[in-house]
Amino acid sequence: MQHFSDAESLVSVSQNPGSLRCRLSTVLVILFFISPSGLRAQQPKASEFEVKAAYLYNFGRFVQWSSAAASAKGNAFPICVFGQDPFGAILDTILSGESIDGKAVVAKRVSKAQDALDCRVLYISASEDSHLKEILAGLDKAGVLTVSDIPQFSQRGGMIQFVVVANKIRFEVNLTSAQDAGLTLSSDLLKVAVAVRKSQQSGD
Amino acid sequence: MFRDYSISKKMTWTNMLVSGAALLLACAAFIGYDLVSFRRAAVYNLSIQAQIAGSNAVSAILFDDPSSAEKTLSALQASPNIISAGILTPNGRPFAAYSRNKDGKMPVLPSLAAGQAETHRFGGGAVLLVRSIVFQRKPTGTIYIQSSIEGLYARLKLYVGISTIVLAMSLLVALLISPIVQREIARPIVQLAEIAQLVSRDKNYSVRAEPSNTRDEISVLVGAFNEMLMQIQQSEGALRKAHDELELRVQERTAELETAKSELEVYSHSILRAKEEVERASKFKDQFLSTMSHELRTPLNAVLGFSDLLADERYGSLNDRQKRYVNNIHTGGQHLLKLISDILDLSKIEAGRMDLAIQEVPMESAFADVVSTLKPLAEKKAQVLAQNCESRLIVRADSTRLKQMLMNLAGNAIKFTPEGGRVELTAYEANGRVRVEVRDTGPGIPPEEQNHIFQAFYRLRQSGPAIEGTGLGLAITQRLAELHGGTLGIDSQPGKGSCFHFSLPVGASLRQSQSTEARVRPVIGEAPKILVIEDDRDAASLIQANLASAGYESVVCDCPQDAVKIVKEMQPDVITLDLLMKPSSGWEVLLQLKRDPRTACTPIVVISILDQPAIGATLGADEYLVKPVEKASLLAAVRRCLGVKQGERSQRPILVVEDDTSTCEIISELLTAQGYAVTTAEDGEQARAQMKAGLPELVILDLMLPKVSGFELLAEWRSKPRTADLPVFVLTSKDLTAEEEQYLRKHAESLFHKQQSWQQGLSQQLQRVLKVSPAVKS
């Protein structure tokens, strides 16, 4: 039995008073599906991908892009899904209205590595396990934070890999990959990571 | 309480109170400020700790890693005061917690208002701070930290302890310092107060307050006080000096007064002695006068009485020479008696001893008395003696003295007016008084003599030795007029007569005053009633007047036809009858009366101008008088008739109490001559014995008796029932005081003065009182 934290708590409510109502309704909807751990049995548990969608957004908040990389990205803050989309509408719902560093966060689906170059965070679907190497190579030094459920992802050149520890969705970080791509990960992020890898391990 | 403390105590208290209060306030302010700062610092520190912990826990919250957050919170362990801490998710769910005691209890958090980043609450010995965790301007969660503030209390205790010690020490210091202050401030004041008390208690103004060597207000006060003391001392000295001088002067004055007083006492003693001497002399003089009047009159009465008896030729006839001599003796004696009376009166007046018995006197009756007395004298000189008086005119006067005055004036007028002249008495009211005039047609008095005539013993030049008189009458009259509040005046011109006049106060009452001879006590029985049958009014009133003067009661009947009827009704004792009357004559009336048995016994005195006594006697008339009738003969006739009627005489004698044997003999002789039985007593003892032996018909009493006086006898008799109604006639030569006279008038039937001619009055009163006529002289 998986235990997920509230999507609401993972995605902090915006302080913008104008969107408060919208936010609230969103949260209510999420609450309807995602039950908080333990005490609220009648509430539906937050789904795995709802948590993961919120994490995608939060990862973006703990990463610092080099100025060159940032300037190449444009004014939006796209969070992209590569390959078969496991989130569906959930991602759009969670990201809608959010912003990071004054840039509006948008959800985007890509199928080619070229399309993913201007993404800030890229979730690589498990469907892309076979040609992961080509994808990562295509994104080389493009300043894209790569996240995936694919096993051994952090060891295979990916930056953040979701893992489940004690029924909770956690993550591993490959700090070297991130540094190679010109990204600086916050120590706060690293602090909560299950594991932080530093050596480049090319394939297995 | 406090206000009763001494000034030094007050100052000590003030010092301690002020320093204690200042210290307390300062400590309180300091402690308060420190506590506030401490709290603020505690909150500040807590806030910083919350911020650090919160920001360190952001990623743990966002990536749902409570253990990481707890690791962060456990860092608070380093601060020993922090009791618990915790992190909540944005929807209020507890995310991570830290507790020093591991009890894990989460406190109730104060809610944060919208837009508020932090709040805190004190309570339960701790402060609870709640802070919102914001990450990238987005609220990410809430952190709270609860910290103990035991330190605050420890601090507070420490402060209170320190403050107490400081306070105690400062009070101690104040206590130690106050004697110094007192020495400077309080002691001079206390000293001043002690001096002031000394001054007010002992009145010692010589003490001085010790001057202080400072230059403050106290030294000014001490200086002013000393100055004041000095001034008081000076003025008190001056006052004492003045007081001493005053006392000395008072003593001197007192001594002077004492001297004056003793002198005065000596004077007053001598004056008193002089007064007593004067009084004694005056009393002696009174006694002398009284004695003299008695002593002189008694022998004179003998002379007069015996010469009278001799003249009556009762004991053998006298030859002409003898008659003339007896007459001379009598006249001389009377003159002497009058002279003595006048001299005594005058000396009494001059001595101021003349007391007037003022009463209401009808003027008419006074005139009538005088006229009836003087009429014989006037008639002798063929003079008209007239009286002219408003009826009911009443004066306030001494009746006796008024008559004396009138007698003197009228007597003089008759004396000096030649034969055929006229003397008129007039009285009328003028200017609120009654003016009395005695006017004559005499020769008048020359003006040069008018001033002298009132002098004693002055006699008119023209009056020769033929006119007798004492020369005292006018002097006495003038004095008496003055005593009545008026003056005696004279209007006269030679050849035109004289008018003497004086005035008297008007009497208010219309009451008829009693005549001097009137009875005060009721007489025994009634006076004899006499019917006067007379149709001529003048004749009738003359008869009536004559009868009244003898005490008879009379009624006039002027209608002869009714006479018999009236006689029957009235039953008179005697009838006087006129003969020539109309319509019916006296003869007819006489006949009718004598014919009727009821009236036949009534004695009748015929008074007529017809000289026919024989016819009268035939018709039954008891007496016959021819007009003009002398009063004496009329009365004698009436007396005889009354005697006839009664037919008997009193068997009881008349008691004569008289110590002078000659006077006693004269009275006895007089009474015996009139048919009365007489017994005599020479003094009071004999009188009492006589009275015991048998009650007399009447008593004739002298007042000046040896051993027992007449007054005593009279009082004695009046007090006993047996003799209470006994008629007593007083015959005296004593000059009576007003009181004595009043007493006698009340208790005696009649009063006669030996200095006046008393014989006739005595006879009349005897007849009136005894109602019996003495037997006709043999």
Image: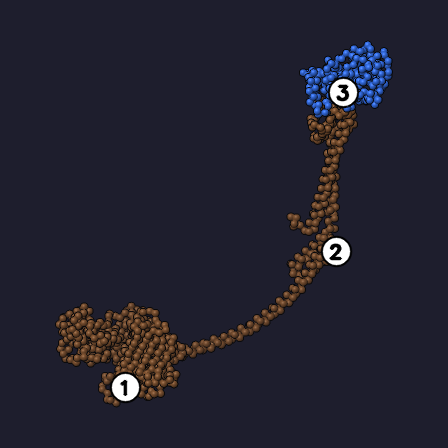
Q: Is residue B159 left or right of residue B402?
A: right
Q: CA distance from mark 3 to mark 1?
A: 201 Å
Do the residues bearing badges 3 and 2 touch, measured as CB atoms within 8 Å?
no
Confirm whether residue B564 shows in the render. yes
Amino acid type at circle 3 is Val
Observer-side mark, 3 or 2, equals 3
- When asked about the image quadrant of residue A183, the answer is top right
Query: Which hue belongs to chain B?
Result: brown
Q: Check if mark 3 and mark 1 are on a common chain.
A: no
Confirm whether residue B68 shows in the render. no
Residue A114: image x %, image y %?
82, 15
Do the residues bearing badges 2 and 1 touch, measured as CB atoms within 8 Å?
no
Residue tagged by mark 1?
A: B327
Residue tagged by mark 2?
A: B214
Q: Could you tell me which chain the residue with mark 3 belongs to?
A: A
Judging by colour alone, the chain drawn in blue in this rendered image is A
> What is the quadrant of the C terminus of chain B in the image?
bottom left
Q: CA distance from mark 2 to mark 1?
A: 134 Å
Nearer-the-camera pick, B63 or B328 = B63
Q: CA distance from mark 3 to mark 2?
A: 94 Å
Residue B719: image x %, image y %?
31, 69
Q: Secondary structure at mark 2?
A: loop
Using the image, determine if residue B615 lies above or below residue B570: below
The residue shown at (60%, 70%) is: B249
Residue tagged by mark 3?
A: A105
